[in-house]
Amino acid sequence: MALLADLLDKYIFSGVPSNAVYDLIKVAWEKANHRSWEDLYLDAFQEALDEIRPRLAAYTESGDVALDRLALSKALHYDLGVAVDALPFSKLSSEELAAELARGMEARSVLIVGGHNLSPDDYAQLTRNLISHAKAHFKEAILTDESAFRRALLDETLTNQKLVQEVQAYLANEFGFALEKLSGIENKIDTQTKLVQQMAVDLGGIKHLAESQSAATPSEIDLDRLALLDELDRASRARCMERWQAAGVARTDAIELAADPSIGAPRPELQLQAEKPLLLLVGELGVGKSLIGERLLQSAIMKARENTEAPVPVYLRARSAAGRLQEAVEAAASGLGNPHVQGATVVIDGADEAGIGPAAEVLAEARILVGTWPRTTTVITSRPTPTLVEAEEAVPVPQLSKEEAYALVSRFAGQPITEGMASGWPVPVRDAIRRPLFAVLLGTHLRDQGRMPRSTGELLADLVERSLGRVKADYASANQLLRRLAVLSTDRGGGSVPSADVASRAEEQQILDSGLAVEHSGAFAFPLPILTQWFAAQSLAAGVPTPDDLMSDPQRLEHWRYSLIIFAGTFSHDQVSKLLIPLAEKYPAFAAEIVNEGLTQWGLVEEVSPPPALECGRRIRTAMQAWVKGIGPLAQLIAPVREDGSLPTIGAQTSGAWLTTAWHRGDKELAEVIEMPASVKFFDQPSSDWTGLRGARPGHQSAWAWRWALDELVSSLSQRLQQRALPVSEDPLALEALWQAALVVTGHGHGSLYPGPIPLAEIEKRLCHLPEDAMITAGSWRLYVGHFKAKVSDLREAGKTELQMPWPGPDRKMSGSMWIWEPYTDKQILARARFVYAGALEGYQQLVDMWFPRLASRMQTAVTLPARLVGVIAPQNQGKSSPTISWYWEALPYGSQSIVDVQIGEIGLDDTYLLSAFDRVRSLRREAVTWIGATLFNGVLRIFGSNPMTELVYTWLWDDLKRIAWV
């Protein structure tokens, strides 16, 4: 152990002579331990925490001490831009990196000390102490298995003979005692393989591997062969497990996936065949190309177990086989058979990782190999690269079918998931789960959470961050280029970008090496929209594009929708606010959609302490001010504003994870944000100086205040709409409200069957006994007596003596039936329907113009108008069934007059009409083409109630506002 420790200290921890030799040692260690250096590094922090936990417990009231491993990983990759797998120990153990990491860990609260009263300086000192202990544990872990390291080093060097001379020279320069031994060996042995074996002996006494096979009996040979096949099979399954675990899948799930041969089973066109002996499987991140290669290898191992004459199964990494493929296969086949005679089934993984030149070399050597040895087949896996995708042997790995995708999600979710159930999922998620990796990640997420995440932004970010587990080391160096590609691609609606616009000639290879982008015909693109959106969100956090640039064009905003959702859900309050403040002020409807999808609702379950009370109040007030400015006149109805439109004082109070806020409405002059008095209670009387009292646990997302303020406004607006309480001042809704009030005052009930008219004298007689400030309740309407009297007076001045029903009434007598439509002939039903729908159209436009001018550009009905309302009314069935209607909006050119075109017919409308309406609205409303749609409405003809126009208007408003997250 002393010699090995000395070697590692000098050879690895003090810097290496070349990346090639360093890679040799690192790969050897990983092969010995079947784990990545990053896993080891993160585990070292957990071990360090366990070691110092008793000391940390003294700082916490609850005794809870934990490590947020995901936050630690983010601190490394996002804050520092560090890929652990790509750094030597000397860098990982440097004081400079430790200081940077400490700052990132403190900002992300990686070290969790529950209920502590630590000062920032004390917390920082504990964090630095944890890092110091973790470095020691990391170094110790590398030295835990000396024999496994020696075996792996020998094996790796045997398949990397080009490095032998470099390794020999380095060992000779570094260790004078070894130089003499190596020189003596060199004089006696003329093959590099023997030299490397002797080097292994010097590193710890490994026995010579070249035992004379003639000395062994046939039974011993068979047993050795079967043991080697078993080891090869276990290694294959271990690699499968490691890939799943590196992507964030739990170990138990990774074991299940690796053990199930149906997961990743190659389709017929991907099977190795004598007439098609060479396959180049090409696929992007998460599509399962490496898994298919492993399944083909496992199948070959099974055949070799059953038949000693079967082709020899061989697994190689492309980067170690390039330039010496036949030699590498022969070495890997040692002890398993003679590939020259019985052939070989060769799986070469990761051709793209070897680089363009070596990858092409491997392909050329594979062509020669399958043409030279009988019964030899080879499969090469690669991400798309310009050289390989154009090869004759290239076969794209297909995505899962929708049925396969939902079946895989269901399996790991522990519940059936159908396409219909997933219809409400974000489009990027439905696209992504066509790849096995994302289907498994989503299934495990659903199983662990019990439901879809409350935030689309969290889900998208979680899927991408976990899927990038295997490639983080590769994309770290190309991160800035990938962000640039994402910005340019997003502005193009997700399309490809000319290479010259993204990177210089020298930089292009960095993008390809990341494995996250593909190049075709001189242009780069991300193979999966969710990757584009994730990297674009990272660019937003870096300030590109700026808010002004982003909001210069509403069409551009739509392209950035999902990137903004990810951004809002994953970055800090201050970062998010820099973008959301101008967005909410200029485009409050679109901003609400982003906040609704990106941020979870404040709730009752998450034990994450919010900032101090005054900071909470400041954040909410900032967000509320932006919303108030954005929604314009609507703020007077639903926002906690004074008569002059300004915001009053907000009070905030925290208790553990709980936050309580309210708005001050008293006359006392107070600061904009104060600590709310403890005397303010949820059940205070209306006379209290505080209103809008709200309490909850804000949750773990930093930008939660934007959702908090929006929810307060949405709740108020929803209540207004449910009560049909938007003020109106013009016909036709005002007349409908007046008619309702008159029916109530005169004792005619709600008047669904009362045809009128009502004499004004009768109304005046009833009103004279009521106080001016009395409220008349008419269905969902509330009308003050004083206001009612003024309306009646206006009718008198206009020469009226009675109040007429505001819609066409019945044209025949009731026959004793209780059906409300029975006294109407079909002709009269049609007349009433046309009148009611025309009045609703007018009333809807009035309310939108009055209260929703700042939201109207995203309200589907408002944008569709002017339009022709096209409908067919199915006649009554001898008065026994309600008339029904099917109808849709047909957009008209701007400047036209909206009209109602409703007819009586035996057959209703079908979807063929809807397709025409959809094409028309997209043609005439080009500014809304990315989101506007068309709907065919089918249902009961609701024109006979006491306020049918009002009900239609509020139904249209509710549907419009629900689409944009404002109810």
Image (spheres, helix red, strand yellow):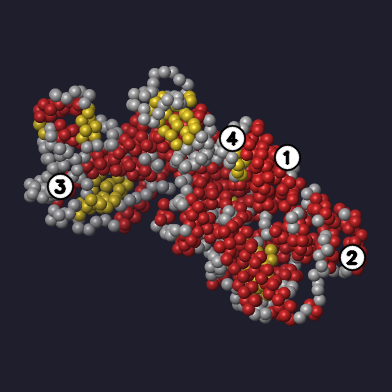
* Disc with the residue nearer the chain's start (1 vs 3): 1
Task: Report, in whole angstroms, how far the alpha carbon at label 3 lies from the one at label 2.
Answer: 108 Å
Assign the N terminus to one quadrant of the image. bottom right
Task: Report, in whole angstroms, how far the alpha carbon at label 1 lies from the one at label 3.
Answer: 82 Å
Q: How many marks?
A: 4
Query: Disc 1 marks which amino acid?
Result: Glu
Q: Secondary structure at mark 4?
A: loop
Can you tell which of label 1 and label 4 is closer to the viewer? 4
Verify CB contact (< 8 Å) between mark 1 and mark 4: no
Task: Report, in whole angstroms, how far the alpha carbon at label 2 lies from the one at label 4.
Answer: 63 Å
Q: Secondary structure at mark 3?
A: loop
Would you name the residue on which mark 2 appears? 185
Residue 96 numbered mark, or none = 1
Task: Report, in whole angstroms, how far the alpha carbon at label 1 lies from the one at label 4.
Answer: 28 Å
Residue 820 numbered mark, or none = 3
* Disc with the residue nearer the chain's start (3 vs 4): 4
Q: Nearer the viewer, residue 949 or 206?
A: 206
Query: Disc 2 marks which amino acid?
Result: Ile
* Disc with the residue nearer the chain's start (2 vs 4): 4
Residue 116 numbered mark, or none = 4
How packed is label 4: few (under 14 Cα within 10 Å), some, or many (20 or more)? some
